[in-house]
C-alpha cells in the first residue's frame, strides 16, 4: 500500500488508535507456569473494561464467566434473524517473552520511513525490520522499547469493538447475528481449555490475531510439548569418578542433540522444528521443556520418536541416570477441518478483495485459539490485524492496516447476511 492518506482519513482511525493505546496500558501478561485460568489476575482488569464497553455499546447477553472468558451477542437486523450467526474472537493476554508492565504506547503520525528512536537504548530500524520501509507516510503505534506493545492481540480486540460499534451506530447496515469472544491465556496454550463452547451459536468464527495486511491463516502447526525429567545419581564431586550421574549435564546433552537445522531460527514456511523453551536443574534432578511443531501428522510422529530416542541415548551416556519423557498434545493443524467448510474461507477472501486488499493465504507458524475452536467443530481461520514484531520490545502496529482490517470485518459480516 503506497498511499496511506485515504485509510488514515477514515473516522475509524482515531478510535482504533485510542483503543489500542488505552488497552496497551493495561498489563495482561499471562504465565504458562500457572495452571489456573486465568493464569494471572491482571487479565481481569482488561476483561472488566471490555465487559463495560460491550454493555455500553448495547450488546446483549454480555457474560464474563468465572474463568475470565468474555462473550456477547449482537442481535440481527430485523428481518435477518434467520441468517447464520458468525463470531469474532481475540485474546486479552500478552506473551511473557518481554514484559508488558507499564507499557508506554505512543502514536507516530506521518512516519518518515527512517530509523525511529524509541528511547536512548532502543531504535526501530528498517534495516533490521524491512516491513517498516513500506510504511513511510503511515501512522505507527509503538512503545519506548522497554515493553511489548501488546498489539498481539489488543489490536484484534480494538478492531472487533470498533467494527461492531459501527454496526450498532448505523442500523441501516443489515447484518445477521454476530457473537464476540475475548479469551484469556492464549499465549500459554491453554486459552480454550475452559472455553464456554455450549454458549456458541455461530456456525463459523474468525480470530483477529494475525499480522501483515492481507495475510489470512487457514493452516497452523500441529503442536506438542515434551517435558523431559532427568534423574541423576549424586555423590561428592571430589570422589565422583565412575559414580556420579549429573542430571544438569544430562539435560545439556539432550539439548545439544536436538537438530540445529530444525530449530525455529533455522526454519520457515512449512518446515517444523524442535524448540527447547525452558531448562532447570541440579546434580540430582533436571528438566527440559521442548516445543515440537510440524504441519503433518507424519512429521510430528517423527519428532516424537526422535525425542524418545534422544532420551534413551542420554540414559546410555550417563550410567545410573534415568530420563522420563512426558509428551502432550497442545493443538492440531486446522487445515483439514477448514477444508470441510470451504465457504468460511471463501467469504473471507471475497471480503478482502471487495475492500481492495489482495489476500495472501499462508500458514501460521504457531497457533491461535481459532485452531482449538476449529478442532472443537467451529471453523475459525485467522485474520490479519496490522501488527508486526509480535513478542518483541520492537512490536509496532500500522494504523492504516488496522482501519482496513475493520473494513474487512464489516464486509465479511455483510457477506454472511447476503
Image (tube, rainbow, N blue to C red):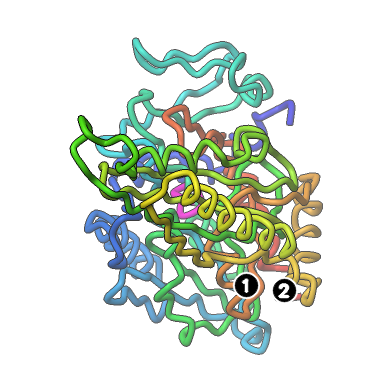
- The reply to whether dot 1 and dot 2 touch (C-beta < 8 Å) is yes
Residue drawn at x 34%, y 66% as measured from the top left: 56
Answer left or right for 276 relative to 219.
left
Callout 2: SS: helix
Up/down of 379 relative to 27, above or below = below
- Which percent across, then down, holds residue 387? 55, 39
| Camera-nearest residue between 282 and 327 | 282
Number of residues whose C-alpha sits closer than 10 Å to that of mark 1, classed few (under 14), some (14–19) or many (20 or more)? many
Magenta-tinted stretch: 153-158
Residue 3 spot, x, y in % from top left: 71, 27
Q: Please tell me which residue is depicted at 66% across the width and 30% down the height of the picture.
A: 4
Tell me the quarter of the image containing the C terminus.
bottom right
Which label was assigned to residue 249?
none
The answer to which quarter of the image holds residue 299 is bottom right
Residue at 43% in and 55% down: 228
* Residue 343 drawn at (x, y percent): 79, 72
Q: Position of residue 323 (x, y in %)?
A: 42, 56
User: Does residue 408 appear in this view?
Assistant: yes
Residue at the spot 39% in from the left edge and 35% down from the top edge? 148
Q: Is residue 70 above or below residue 111?
A: below
Label 1 element class: helix
Q: Which residue is mark 2?
A: 337
Q: Is residue 208 visible?
A: no
Quadrant for the N terminus in the image? top right
Residue 374 is marked as 1
For this rendering, which residue is in front, 113 or 404? 113
Main secondary structure along the magenta-highlighted residues: helix
Amino acid at each position: 500500500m503506497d498511499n496511506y492518506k485515504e485509510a488514515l482519513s477514515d473516522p475509524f482511525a482515531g478510535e482504533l488508535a485510542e483503543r489500542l493505546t488505552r488497552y496497551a496500558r493495561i498489563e495482561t501478561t499471562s504465565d504458562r507456569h500457572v495452571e489456573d485460568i486465568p493464569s494471572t489476575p491482571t487479565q481481569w482488569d482488561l476483561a472488566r473494561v471490555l465487559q463495560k464497553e460491550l454493555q455500553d455499546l448495547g450488546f446483549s447477553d454480555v457474560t464474563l464467566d468465572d474463568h475470565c472468558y468474555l462473550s456477547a451477542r449482537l442481535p440481527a437486523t430485523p428481518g435477518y434473524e434467520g441468517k447464520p450467526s458468525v463470531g469474532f474472537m481475540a485474546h486479552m493476554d500478552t506473551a511473557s517473552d518481554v514484559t508488558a508492565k507499564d507499557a508506554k504506547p505512543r502514536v507516530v503520525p506521518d512516519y518518515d520511513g527512517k530509523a525511529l528512536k524509541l528511547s536512548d537504548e532502543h531504535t526501530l530500524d528498517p534495516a533490521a525490520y524491512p516491513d517498516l520501509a513500506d510504511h513511510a507516510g503511515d501512522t505507527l503505534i509503538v512503545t519506548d522499547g522497554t515493553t511489548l506493545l501488546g498489539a498481539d492481540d489488543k489490536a484484534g480486540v480494538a478492531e472487533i469493538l470498533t467494527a461492531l460499534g459501527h454496526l450498532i451506530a448505523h442500523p441501516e447496515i443489515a447484518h445477521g447475528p454476530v457473537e464476540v469472544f475475548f479469551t484469556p491465556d492464549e499465549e500459554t496454550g491453554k486459552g480454550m481449555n475452559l472455553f464456554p463452547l455450549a454458549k456458541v451459536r455461530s456456525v463459523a468464527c474468525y480470530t483477529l490475531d494475525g499480522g501483515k495486511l492481507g495475510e489470512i491463516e487457514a493452516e497452523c502447526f500441529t503442536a506438542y510439548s515434551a517435558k523431559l525429567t532427568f534423574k541423576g545419581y549424586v555423590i561428592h564431586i571430589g570422589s565422583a569418578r565412575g559414580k556420579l550421574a549429573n542430571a544438569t549435564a544430562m539435560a545439556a546433552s539432550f539439548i545439544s542433540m536436538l537438530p540445529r537445522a530444525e530449530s525455529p531460527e533455522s526454519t520457515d514456511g512449512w518446515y517444523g522444528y524442535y524448540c527447547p523453551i525452558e531448562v532447570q536443574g541440579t546434580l540430582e534432578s533436571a528438566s527440559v521443556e521442548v516445543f515440537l511443531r510440524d504441519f503433518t501428522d507424519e512429521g510430528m510422529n517423527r519428532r516424537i520418536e526422535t525425542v524418545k530416542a534422544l532420551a534413551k541415548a542420554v540414559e546410555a551416556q550417563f550410567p545410573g541416570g534415568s530420563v522420563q519423557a512426558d509428551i502432550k498434545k497442545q493443538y492440531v493443524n486446522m487445515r483439514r477441518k477448514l477444508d470441510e467448510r470451504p465457504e468460511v474461507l471463501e467469504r473471507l477472501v471475497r471480503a478482502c478483495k471487495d475492500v481492495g486488499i489482495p489476500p495472501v493465504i499462508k500458514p501460521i507458524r504457531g497457533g491461535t485459539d481459532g485452531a482449538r475452536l476449529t478442532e472443537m467443530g467451529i471453523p475459525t481461520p485467522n485474520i490479519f490485524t496490522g501488527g508486526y514484531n509480535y513478542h518483541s520490545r520492537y512490536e509496532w502496529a500500522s494504523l492504516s492496516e488496522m482501519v482496513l482490517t475493520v473494513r474487512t470485518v464489516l464486509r465479511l459480516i455483510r457477506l454472511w447476511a447476503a
